Image (tube, grey):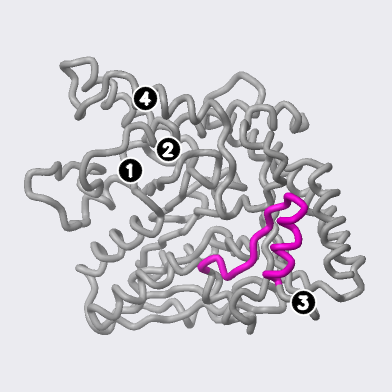
Amino acid sequence: MTLDVAALRAQFPSLTSGIAHFDGPGGTQTPAVVGEAIARTITAPLSNRGRVMQSERNADTVVGDFRAAIADLLGGRAEGVVYGRSATQLTYDVSRALAKTWAAGDEVVVSQLDHDANVRPWIQAAEAVGATVRWLRLDPGTADLDLGELDAVITDRTRLVAVTGASNLLGTKPDVARIARRAHEVGALVYVDGVHFAAHAAVDVAALGADFFVCSPYKFFGPHCAALIAEPALLESLSPDKLLPSSNAVPERFELGTLPYELMAGTTAAVDFIAALAPAGGTRRERIVVAHHVVDEHERRLRGRIEAGVAELDGSVTLHSVAADRTPTLFLTFRDRDATDAYRSFADRGILAPAGTFYALEPFRALGLDVDGGLRIGLAAYNDDAEIDRLLEALVEFVG
């Protein structure tokens, strides 16, 4: 099957604004069904969770539905799904809990490809206990991690490896499974930042080798929040800081305060929205996998059109997103122009393609780029050929 983009776009009220959104890596637009689920949940009888009153049952059902939806999305177990305000918050929480089990002489591995949310928490946690930080290096020529020294970087002293599933800056999808195999050989845990990856791939946490996997629903049509998945037994082994009266059951022991039930309902609606892009029949998990394949074909074709257009610009634009396996995210720099000027020029045409580092500080350093020196074009399922036409026209005009 092919994606019916016109029918898809009709489900997003914000797209009637005329803005061409190429800011998907920063957050997608939201379909009406997600907003309706949020409104329906927060205006229905709602109270703290329980099974006696209807308002209590409503809240409890929403939480269970959220965990089941994320488990279907990621191919894991609902009992291991933790709600969080953001991926950054969840990563800080897990890093602090894990650091309680580390000591001086232990090693933590991070990557130059990652968003700072999967770098700084681990560096800070390691520093707090005297552990050593080691790096997986980014090769600017391939825009991918250099795994030639993988066996040397991950050693018998490694306790954790943190790596992205896909770069939010370059789109690169590193070989996480290979990295995870090496980490598990030495008994280390693997923490995968899947925030960008989950928006563009049918995730299978077991196949990736991810002991922890974190994602953000607002990157795949949902509300602003996050979710983490891990094996329940692994979560049982951790002792995060928490209030004494709060539940110590997994996964609740990682969730602080009263949960925002409306955002959890919106997340479930977003997962159902993705599943509905596939033909009816089969489990929700099976439909999610099919839907991602269909969307991937559409996004790859549009990405190819942009890449072909950039190639015709006679070297005035450099495309840094060149990894063999990558998402439909393109990072550009300009030979004689500032990327911020490009962002503003595009905005004058009703096109949103932002400039900046996008918290990908380490990739910027590895590429040797100036801060705010690049423009990011990120595709989502609702982008269409007419928007690509507008984008390419704006790009040609900008470079002159």
Marks 2 and 1 close (CB-CB < 8 Å): yes
Where is residue 375, by image quadrant?
bottom right
Task: Name the residue that disc number 1 marks.
Answer: 80
Q: Secondary structure at mark 2?
A: helix
Marks 4 and 3 close (CB-CB < 8 Å): no
* Residue in the image at 14% along x and 42% along y: 247
Q: Residue furthest front?
A: 348
Mark 4 or 3, nearer chain start: 4
Q: Secondary structure at mark 4?
A: helix
Where is residue 178, by image quadrant?
bottom right
Q: Which mark is residue 41?
A: 4
Marks 1 and 4 close (CB-CB < 8 Å): no
Crowding at dot 3, Cα within 10 Å, few <14 / some 14-19 / many 20+, comes out as some
* Residue in the image at 78% along x and 73% along y: 318
Q: Secondary structure at mark 1?
A: helix
Marks 2 and 4 close (CB-CB < 8 Å): no
Mark 1 or 4, nearer chain start: 4
Magenta stretch bounds:
339-359
Mark 3 or 1, nearer chain start: 1
Query: Vertical placement of 278 versus 112: above or below?
Result: above
The amino acid on which the numbered mark 1 sits, given as a three-letter code, is Gly
Crowding at dot 4, Cα within 10 Å, few <14 / some 14-19 / many 20+, comes out as some
Crowding at dot 1, Cα within 10 Å, few <14 / some 14-19 / many 20+, comes out as many
